[in-house]
Each structure stands twice: as structure tokens, then as C-alpha cells.
Image (spheres, grey):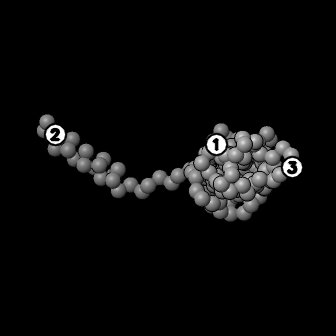
């Protein structure tokens, strides 16, 4: 099929714009750490009183305000899995969880969160299947 000159020029302009456009910045993601300041944290306790980890909520003013959650396990290779969860009151959410994780999950982060309230949760599952969870999964907070 042969294109007319005007059509070929338009196609070339579109291809050029797509190939050389600046990449979009990600609004959420998963990384091996969080940046900014820890604004809340909670211990993760198994029934019976053994602390097996902690969950941290971080905030940074970068990128329109960034919330980030990371969960640390103290069980090492004896874990049955770890999870980090983050919810924003504007409907956005992000999570990272796997049965193969041994030391941490997350950080899960969401940008452009200035002025938005959050819920967060961390979980550590023992090798026997007992779940330790904590954070603030039930009420909105850390609005800012």
C-alpha cells in the first residue's frame, strides 16, 4: 500500500513524537526501600506474644508527596511470607506480598499524595501459618 505525501508526513510526525517524548513518571511502584521520614510504625506480633517484624509508613514531600510502606520480618528463612499494603482515601492502592519473601516486602509507594489520608498494613506469616499483622488498616490517618 502506498501512502500519499500528506499521510506519510503525518505518520512520520506521530512516530517522531512517540519515539522522542519524555517518559511518563510512575505514580506508584515497588522498591527495595522507602525515602523520606518514618511517620508511623507498628510491631508485628504473633498470638502468644512473639514479635516477628515491624511495618513502617514513610512520607516524603518529593513528587507531590510520596507515601511508602515497608514490612520487615525478624524470622529470616522461617517465614511463610511477608506483605506490605498501602491505601489512599482517593481510591488508589498498592501492595507487595509473596510467600517466597524472607526479610521484607515493599516498599510500596504512591506519588502525588499530598493532602491525602492513608491506611497501611504489614503482615508476616510464620512457617506454621500463623499471621502477625499491624499498622492502621481500619482507619484513615496521616493526612497531609
> Is tag 1's residue or tag 2's residue first in the polypeptide sequence?
2
Q: Dot 1 surroundings within 10 Å: few (below 14), some, or many (20 or more)? A: some
Q: Is residue 36 visible?
A: yes
- Which residue sits at x=21%, y=41%? 7
Q: Secondary structure at mark 2?
A: loop
At x 77%, y 53%, the residue is 52
Mark 3 or mark 2: name the one nearer the start of the chain: 2
Residue 114 pos. (x, y %): 68, 52
Q: Label 3 vs label 1: CA separation?
A: 30 Å
Image coordinates for residue 19, horizontal then vertical, percent: 33, 53
Residue 85 position within the rendered picture, expressed as x and y whole percent measured from the top left = 68, 45
**SS at mark 1?**
strand
Q: Is residue 51 left or right of residue 12?
A: right
Q: CA–CA distance between discs 3 and 2?
A: 73 Å
In which quadrant will I find the N terminus?
Answer: top left
Q: Is residue 42 depicted above or below 1 in this figure?
A: below
Q: Nearer the viewer, residue 22 or 118?
A: 118
Please report whichever mark, 3 or 1, sits nearer to the chain's N-terminal start.
3
Label number found at residue 3:
2
Q: CA distance from mark 1 to mark 2?
A: 46 Å
Do callouts 3 and 2 mark residues in contact (Cβ within 8 Å)?
Answer: no
Which residue corresponds to the image point at 84% horizontal and 44% vertical from the top-left?
Answer: 47
Q: Classify 10 Å Cα crowding around label 3: few (below 14), some (14-19), many (20 and above).
A: few
Q: Closer to the observer: label 3 or label 1?
A: 3
Kindly give the residue lying farthest to the bottom in the view shown.
36
Residue found 16% across the figure and 44% down from its top = 5
Check contact, mark 3 vs mark 1: CB within 8 A: no
- Residue 102 picture location, percent across and down: 64, 54
Q: Which residue is mark 1?
A: 93
The residue under label 3 is 49
Residue extending furthest toward the left: 2
Amino acid at each position: 500500500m502506498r501512502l500519499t505525501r500528506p499521510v506519510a508526513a503525518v505518520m512520520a510526525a506521530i512516530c517522531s513524537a512517540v519515539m522522542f517524548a519524555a517518559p511518563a513518571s510512575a505514580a506508584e511502584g515497588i522498591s527495595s526501600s522507602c525515602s523520606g521520614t518514618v511517620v508511623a510504625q507498628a510491631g508485628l506480633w504473633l498470638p502468644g506474644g512473639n514479635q516477628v517484624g515491624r511495618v513502617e509508613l514513610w512520607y516524603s514531600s518529593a513528587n507531590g508527596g510520596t507515601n511508602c510502606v515497608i514490612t520487615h520480618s525478624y524470622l529470616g528463612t522461617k517465614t511463610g511470607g511477608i506483605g506490605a499494603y498501602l491505601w489512599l482515601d482517593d481510591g488508589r492502592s498498592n501492595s507487595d506480598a509473596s510467600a517466597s519473601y524472607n526479610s521484607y516486602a515493599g516498599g510500596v509507594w504512591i506519588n502525588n499524595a499530598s493532602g491525602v489520608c492513608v491506611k497501611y498494613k504489614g503482615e508476616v506469616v510464620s512457617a506454621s501459618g500463623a499471621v502477625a499483622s499491624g499498622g492502621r488498616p481500619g482507619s484513615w490517618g496521616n493526612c497531609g
